[in-house]
Image (spheres, rainbow, N blue to C red):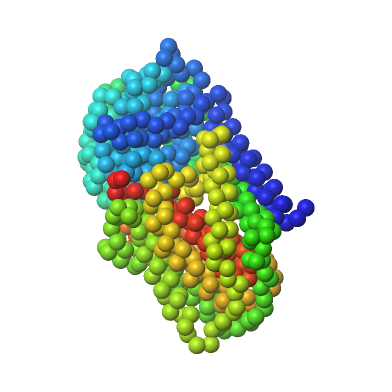
Amino acid sequence: MPGHRRLLSIGLVLVLAGALLAHFVQTAGGIRVMDVRFIGSDGSPMSALLYVPPGATANTPAPGILAVHGYINSRETQSGFAIEFARRGYVVLTLDQRGHGYSAPPAFAAGFGGPDGLAYLRSLAMVDRNNIGLEGHSMGGWTVLAAAAVFPNDYKSMVLEGSSTGGPFAAEGTPTFPRNVAVVFSRYDEFSRLMWGVRSAREIAESPKLWSLFGMNAPVEPGKVYGSAGNGTARVLYAPAVTHAMDHLSTEAIGYSIDWFQKTLSGGKPLPVDDQIWIWKEIGTLVAFIGCIALLLGAFAGLLLLPWFAPLAAQPVMSGSRRDGRWWISLIIGAALPAVTLLPFFQLAEALAPAVSLFPQSLTNQIAVWAVLNSLIVLGLSFVPGGARPQFNTHTRRSIAIAIVTVAIGYAALAVCDFLFTVDFRFWVLALKLLSRPQWTAFLAYLIPFTLFFVVTLRALHSAITRATARPAAQYLINIAALAGGFAAFVKIQYGMLFTTGSMLMFFDSDVLRTIIAIQFVPLMSIVAIIATFTYRRTNSYLPGAFICALFVTWYIVAGQATHVGA
């Protein structure tokens, strides 16, 4: 079988098998998963996934849970919690916060969308309105707190995952508000300062802010239930041994949520806390994600065989330079520069590039400014005397066209899986989603700076690094090291400090969030390296790979970020 057909076949099989596995897991036992849209109290469109267990009807209403993701995530991020809640007989609404996923921008509006989500859940005839729980991760905790503040008598209990009461964005916690709350705050949570005002998550039991919630004047004992569930004053602290983002991949963190709702909500189907299957859904969508990348590569190779794209095909000279001192310097600088500039350039962008109508996503603006500034640095370094000056096979129009068609095939595969199985392509913080209508407009604007970045970066990569070896495996590994190695080292240093000292290296409070974003850069830039190397080896050009990566990465970022300016 020709190589492009083999890749296409592998990609299609992986996409289909992964999506089917994810679908079967989230619908296990007869659960129905539905994409629901509704109108919020201010007339804004809202989005959520609704998990309905068998037996939940208007005649036999079931307890309900509103589950909400954190900042720059979406409704699917809560699927591990939702699957396990639904398996235990709860109707679960996993909400897209305002300005996230498919809920209308701007982010942070209308209590993050929490009051509207609770009102919609209570409006469903299949839900027992007197038996509702609220669960939120990180900013999702502030979302459910906003719902509880607006509707203080419309829920029975709450789980705050990696979240907190009080400033900067939530109502203050007291011994009576919120009702029956479990605080699940991981031992290595990166946001201990923001959430509970302590240097390290290990010190949360001694947080005066937590004491106010528990009505204590002494350290809170993890695992001990304080107060009474009968009068709504029950409180408990759990501390799983994971990080903030790892709450979504922790059977321990999810298990604590299950346990709390089984203690504080009536009805449902009792299952042991450790009876959890959600990880197979994550594995399924990861397999589908990998299949999508294989599909892109196979589609590109197949398109090169068409007459109009045939001029793009060319064999590059793979050994035009040696791995000498200059090559090693290029590799080290190329890997280190993007990671070293991450925090300062993001901070600069936060000050100088706020969200506006054309560029409505604050964090995407920071990534775009970082990308443009790195492009200018790399462009300046390319004029240093003595550097490689290879001849590339450049056909700009054909390169743009083949990139558009290639990425469109991957997008179509995701659209089919979303339509048939109600799943996207993801694993943990890595997520590839369909774009909403407002996000399409933003996508076109952000495509410009990201195209500049990938054109400049991949030209430099193939000029200075790729050509020094003819062995395919070595090329792929070296290019992954060049594009993702710096981020991997940065993340390792930051989390090494967190695990040993309790806190990361930070110049500004927002550097914690930027470090979590950098985690995504490791697999994302590895994918970029694979695409760049694959396309270069078949075209002797950096342009097709640059345009494919620009389209793919812009799609990935814009679909997954929060939108801060309304339409």
Residue closest to the eye, 339 or 110:
110
Residue closest to the eye, 524 or 232:
524
On the question of residue 31 being in view, the answer is yes
Figure disc tally: 0
The image shows residue 487, relative to residue 381, as above or below, that is above
Q: Is residue 499 left or right of residue 151?
A: right
Spot occupied by residue 376 in the image (x, y as percentages of width and height): 41, 74
Spot occupied by residue 235 in the image (x, y as percentages of width and height): 31, 33
On the question of residue 181 being in view, the answer is no
Which image quarter is the C terminus in? top left
The image shows residue 186, relative to residue 496, as above or below, that is above
Spot occupied by residue 111 in the image (x, y as percentages of width and height): 26, 38
Which residue does the image show at 64% across and 53% down from the upper left? 299
Farthest residue in the right direction? 1
Which residue does the image show at 63% across and 71% down from the upper left? 540
Spot occupied by residue 37 in the image (x, y as percentages of width and height): 39, 32
Which residue does the image show at 28% across and 33% down from the upper left? 43
Residue closest to the eye, 474 or 380:
380
Which residue does the image show at 56% across and 82% down from the upper left? 388
- In the figure, residue 283 lies in which quadrant? top right
